[in-house]
Structure formats: C-alpha cells, structure tokens
Amino acid sequence: MPLRIAVVASGRGSNLQAILDAIAAGTLDAEVVGVWSDRRDAFALERARSAGVPAHPVRPRDYADRAAHDLALFGAIDAAAPDLIVCAGYMRLIGAAAVEARPGRMINIHPSLLPAFKGLHTHQQALDAGVTEHGASVHVVTADLDAGPVLAQARVPVLPGDTAEALAARVLAREHPLLLETLRWIADGRLVLQGSRVQVNGRPLTAPLQLAANQRFA
Ligand code: GRF
C-alpha cells in the first residue's frame, strides 16, 4: 500500500514538487492525498492542482484564533486519512493541541543542522555564526518549535564569500533528496515513528541518518 501523505506548505512548494515528481517517476511508493496551505496564493497549491492533487487553502483570518484555525486545518487533513503529515515550508506555528493529537504522524523539513539555528533566517544565522558546515534536517514535529527528534540530515559546506541566498540554494538542492529518502524509509518501514520515539531497522535511532553523496543514507 502506498504511503498516504498530506502536505502542508505556505509558499513556493519545491519540496512538494520533489515528492510529486518522485511519485510520478515511480521512485517513491506514496500518494499525496492533498495539499493544505494557510495562504490562498501559495504556489504549492498551484503545483498540487497541476498534478491533479486536491489543493486546500485554509486561511487563518477566517478563524477566531490559532486553535480554531489548527482545528479546521488538521480536521480537514484527518478526513483525508493520511498516514503521515509532511510540513514542507509551512511557516506558521502549530499549537500544541494539534501536534499532540497526532503523535508521530507529523514531520517537518528545516533548513539547518538541528539543533543549530532554529526558527527563521537560518542561512543568515549560519553565516553570522561563522560555521563551516550547514545543511537541512527532517524531524518529528513536537509541541516545541524545531525541537522534535531529528530523523535525518544533509550537510553542505559554507564557502568563502557565501551570501544567505547562495547558501540557501546549496541547502535546497540537498533538501529534496533528503526529504525523499526519509519518506522512502518511512514508506518501506525501515524508519518507524512511535510518538516522539523513532526506530530504524528495528532499533532505536540514536543519531540522525546522514544523506550521502549518492542521495542515499550512509
Ligand atoms: C525550505 O527551505 C524548507 O526547509 C523550509 O522552508 C523552505 C520551503 O521551500 N521549511 P519550498 O516551499 O519547499 O520550496
């Protein structure tokens, strides 16, 4: 049975596109059951429609508060019966109640080597800190921002003269294979999420999987 994935995105949707392309190419055994966004103009919704996937804007301004918006958004997602909810560039905080009601069923891709550089402007944060290595992480969503167990990471060098834009582009090129390989491992049961605990090949995951140059986990 293909892994049923719901995607939540606020903007460009290049990670979503990577998922859609991999499914179409037969390299990811999954189905995107819908794409949800807090922004009606998110390009991610356009990408969903082009792929024949249901696209759903759920705007915060139509709800009284965060809890009511979360309830509507995640209630609609639950109705599509996904196995996994993938936050791919979803730029809103998700309330603890919505997260805790779906233990081990939500993952997020974040453009840093967590636990370094949580929150926004991660590439500038990395440049300001003077690190020589940066990257991206896929983690389990918990009630604390960007703090759930890290499943997998991809690393890139920080090069002399890098701007935040140049670094972001280098990271993004690795985000797509990172997210796809993580989804493959979840789809075929090598990676199992149990609440905030994670098993890999039947054993507790003790350190994030690392994406190798061949775009597989080392
Ligand atoms: C990515 O850098 C992702 O890591 C972050 O937001 C960005 C989304 O990009 N959470 P896209 O919308 O998938 O192109």
Image (cartoon, rainbow, N blue to C red):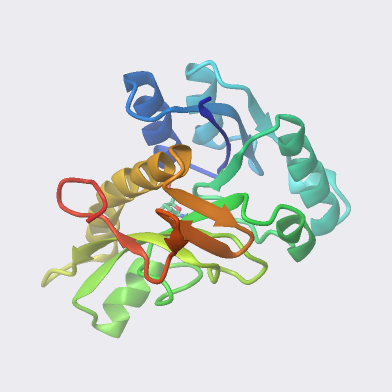
* Spot occupied by residue 24 in the image (x, y as percentages of width and height): 38, 20
* Spot occupied by residue 137 in the image (x, y as percentages of width and height): 39, 61
Above or below, comparing residue 164 to residue 50 in the picture? below
* Spot occupied by residue 150 in the image (x, y as percentages of width and height): 45, 65
Q: Is residue 68 left or right of residue 184?
A: right
Residue located farthest toward the right when viewing the structure as drawn? 64
Residue located 70% across and 32% down the image? 81
Residue 12 in sight in this render: no
Q: Please state which of residues 26 and 93 is positioned toward the viewer in this rendering.
A: 26
Q: Is residue 124 left or right of residue 9?
A: left
* Spot occupied by residue 47 in the image (x, y as percentages of width and height): 48, 26
Name the quadrant containing residue 200: bottom left
Residue located farthest toward the left when viewing the structure as drawn? 160
Indicate the quadrant containing the C terminus: top left, top right, bottom left or bottom right: bottom left
Residue 105 in sight in this render: yes
Q: Please state which of residues 185 and 160 is positioned toward the viewer in this rendering.
A: 185
Residue located 71% across and 29% down the image? 80
Residue located farthest toward the front when viewing the structure as drawn? 202
Name the quadrant containing residue 171: bottom left
Name the quadrant containing residue 207: bottom left
Q: Please state which of residues 43 and 193 is positioned toward the viewer in this rendering.
A: 193
Residue located 63% across and 41% down the image? 39
Count all numbered tags in the image, as a single digit: 0
Residue located 13% across and 70% down the image? 161
Residue located farthest toward the bottom when viewing the structure as drawn? 129
